[in-house]
Amino acid sequence: MRFLKKLLKVLGYILGIFLLLILVFCGYVWWVSDIKPPHVEDTSAVFLQKIHTDNTLYTIGDNWIRHSRYGLYEMYVSGGAFERGVKNGKLSQKLITDQEEAFTQEIKRMVPSHSYLKFLKYVIGFMNKNLPANVTEEYKDEIYGISRSASDSFDWIGNNYARILNYHAAHDIGHALQNMMLVGCTSFGAWGDKTANGSMLLGRNFDFWVGDRFAENKIVAFYKPDKGNKFAFVTWGGFTGVVSGMNDKGLTVTINAARSDIPWSGAATPVSLVAREVLQYSSNIDQAIAIARRRKMFVSESFLIGSAADHKAIIIEKTPDTLDIYDPGKDNIQCTNHYQGKTFEHQKLNVEQKQKSASVYRYERLQELMQQNYPLTPQKMADILRDRRGLHGTDIGEGNEKAVNQLIAHHSVIFQPDSLRMWVSTQPWQLGTYVCYDLKKIFSLNGMYRDLEIADTTLNIAPDTFLYSDEFKRFELYRKNKIALLHKKPVDTAEVVHSNPNLYDAYRIAGDYCQEQKWYIAAINYYNAALAHEVATVTEREAIEYKIASCRKKLNN
């Protein structure tokens, strides 16, 4: 009896110490994730007033935002860091709130458990504990300026500044936690003999999907900072990082995710802010490399850099601890989601990525399309970015990750650095009009006082004819059922299969719904049909095979 009392006493001490450690850890995580705004000396910009000038045009002095007839928001911002941020925030306030609402709704759908969502909040806070120390004072001040216009409705996530700052690392965190890479971006370029007039052309699909609503309000932003280059980039409310952009020196930056480990060592500089710094402070490839080299990142990424000054493009391949430069040594370049340089050729994660993902297949299809379309023009670049087929033109279904056009892109862009022109896609995905912007013309504007189109519409690229086809209508039926499954709603299994009969995922969706309904024989049949088609990745094939085994086990019990 005495022994039992001693044992219980010891266990009580152990349990008490364990609970104390948990409390200390939780307190530490709360402390490190409680990010405070930077101190700004001159905050007079907060008193600037937004004026409704004309129709969709709003102005703050010579800064402005408008909504084009093509559905794109166009915004011009100038000044110092905090001032820029305040102007951005005031001009795009509604877009910031809408974007945050769209993002959080999709996160809640993906993680319906409130307690688990709260747990993830602290995990991400812990992973981002050193984030402020890895962001330049300039960008912290700018983000703080933007955050002053953010909504207080989301303070369950954190204070306004902490949230907007952390959103700049969302790409990196999602990429690392699930190796999502937001599916797979595609970028490429050509110059010299490979283009119609010898000028450089670069194109990219930014395949980032966190719900349809997130992609509704795209902003084409034109920045004239008090330091560095003037530049343009495609973005969304509250986001001042760069994923696709070009500066007034004819230097372009696009980012493509590569396979990464989970960054438990703590935060580094978000990829989008590294790309932003490259755009703002580089005029040539060497300067871009120098900036990328001195910034620590916690995920692996490829930066496709095009340079009018060098009249070529290269890829900066960067991991958290190593950097390599891939220069193809010829007049064309391709980039998907694996590394091509010698340094990472045999790296374990890169080998796995090449073997198990859709990256190599899409890369080969991209090479095939470029070869078929030389010499390239902006129209031919758009045709390649819109291509929905597999190798040799095989029908692999609409929306297959192995295709260049996966029908999920947040945006698609074509750059012509020599002439400082860029074409930005309009909804849906890259199927709508590619709107042409001439950076020389836009940066020569001295404010806007009437709501006028600023695009060079005579050079616009017409919408894809697929948009008006019966095939597109059927694809919409497929997507309707796919989204129904995501939201735990009924799926019309016959409709989803018939609407996209060559896509493995149509059968996977039907199989998943049948499995949820405990119709195991039907589920197995659909899963087997999925495996008979072009499955995008080894991981997805293995997941389908596991589901077949699981259904068979249920039938045998």
Image: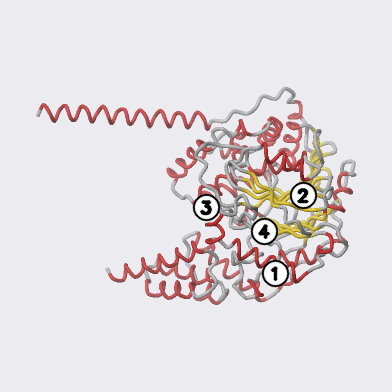
Residue ID for mark 2: 252
Asked if labels 2 and 1 touch by Cβ distance under 8 angstroms, the answer is no
Q: Nearer the viewer, mark 1 or mark 2?
A: 1
Residue 99 located left or right of residue 505:
right
Report how far apart the C-alphas of labels 3 and 4 lie in the structure: 22 Å
Report how far apart the C-alphas of labels 3 and 2 lie in the structure: 30 Å
> If you read the primary sequence from the N terminus, does the residue marked by circle 1 or circle 2 appear first?
2
Q: Is residue 159 above or below residue 448?
A: above
Report how far apart the C-alphas of labels 1 and 2 lie in the structure: 24 Å
Residue 149 picture location, percent across and down: 67, 36
Report how far apart the C-alphas of labels 3 and 1 lie in the structure: 27 Å
Residue drawn 50% across the image and 64% down it:
538
Residue 478 picture location, percent across and down: 57, 69
Residue ID for mark 1: 368
Residue ID for mark 4: 186
Q: Quadrant of the C terminus?
A: bottom left
Q: Which of the pair 555/47 is nearer the observer? A: 555
Residue 300 picture location, percent across and down: 59, 47
Q: Residue type at mark 3?
A: Lys
Q: Which mark is residue 348?
A: 3
> If you read the primary sequence from the N terminus, does the residue marked by circle 1 or circle 4 appear first?
4
Q: Which mark is residue 64?
A: none
